[in-house]
Image (cartoon, rainbow, N blue to C red):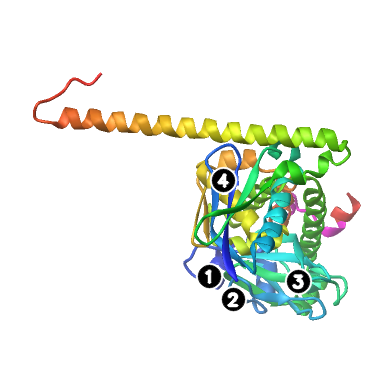
Amino acid sequence: MSLFYFILKDGGEPVPDREGNEFPDKGAAYLYANTVAHELMRNREATTRFWRLEVRDDDLRPVSEVPFATIDDSICHLSPEYRRAIQKTCRNLGMLSDAIYEVRATLRQIKTTIARADEVMLSSPLGGHPR
Amino acid sequence: MQTDLKTQFVGERNLHNKCLAALSSTAQSILRQHLTDVVLREGTVLWEPGRPVDDVYFPISGLLSVVFVMTDGACVEVGSIGREACAGSVLNSAQSDFPTLGMVLIGGDFTRIPGAELLRVARESDEVKMLLTFAGDWMTMQAQQLAACNAVHSADRRFCRWLVQSSRRMETVTLHATQESIASILGIRRTTVTLIAQTLQQNGIIQYRRGKVSVVDMARLQSCACDCLNAVDRRYWPSARLAEAQTQGRTIERYARE
């Protein structure tokens, strides 16, 4: 049995399950992730369609991912062509959300660094003139 | 009259079952000789399908859960009982082999009474009869609400609804409940509960640490919960209905007529 972890990517800060679960192999972990994704998505399909659930191994290496759009029962009635288009759009939307989150996180880090630099300059014996 | 029960059963802990406390001192004195204080741990099974137990439990600081058990072992909560009511297989299952299981979801103090005694007292006391009627109504209302809720509401909204309702019933913003036990009563995987709880925590709504969940922002938690929150609220608590009946001098016969 090996330990697997799950990370929810919903466009914001990634949500990790730090406890993890033991499974005999990657396939069993993927099936479990599928069930969890179904449970998270049920009765709110439209707002969670671009979410993804990532499976990671014991060394936290990504091993698979469940895009919610691929398990969305509410679009089953559509033609395969439309479903594929929705799934592709959701994938792109997910990647865009990730990128926007990363940019925001970087901006926050930069602001924190500048604030610290200002503090250091003010407390130095030479004084300083922060912006 | 409420002080009587507090002193008698839980000393200075300033806690009591609101349902028992809503009874008149006469009804309390009749019941008192049959009541026993017990401390029950999380996970204690009170009754299970095919093994009914005569006792009826009045939670003081714990929370009981009545779950419906499927043939494959899966289960989902059909009722939750805190300080506002009481539960027992003699009250909640019409048949001894009916597949419901009563368990302690959050451990704590409880007051126990043999069901046979409670039913006997109810034949003599109009108030106790009312208590049993209201307790039965409460279970029916919850089962109806949960059936609808489980069918149409999302897991995250159900989790928030459960948390607010439990917090109200236990009159605390900190609940000692593991993610495993919450997952089992909501009929979902532990990982699903963890991811929902983690999202709420990252948004500053709750804090989850070592089997203890604390509500940080109750207003936002309520806004994240499903509509069921207000459909089955404290107006229907057996304790509230008993207190209302006391003030209005109602009897069970009058309730039946109305």
Label 3 crowding class (10 Å Cα cut-off): few <14, some 14-19, many 20+?
many
In this rendering, do the residues under marks 1 and 2 share a single chain?
yes
Q: Are marks 4 and 2 on the same chain?
A: yes
The residue labelled by disc 1 is B10
Tell me the distance, in whole angstroms, between the alpha carbons under discs 1 and 2. Answer: 8 Å
- Provide the residue designation for mark 3: B101
Figure quadrant of residue B192? bottom right
Asked if both marks, 3 and 2, belong to the same chain, the answer given is yes
Which residue matches tag 2?
Answer: B37
Regarding mark 1 in the picture, which secondary structure is present there? helix
Amino acid type indicated by mark 1:
Val
Q: Amino acid at mark 4?
A: Thr
> Contact, CB < 8 Å: mark 1 with mark 2?
yes
The residues colored magenta run B244-253
Mark nearer the N terminus (4 vs 3)? 3
- At 75% from the left edge and 40% from the top edge, which residue is drawn? A45
Q: Amino acid at mark 3?
A: Leu
**Sequence order check, earlier mark of 4 and 2:** 2
On screen, A3 above or below B162?
A: below
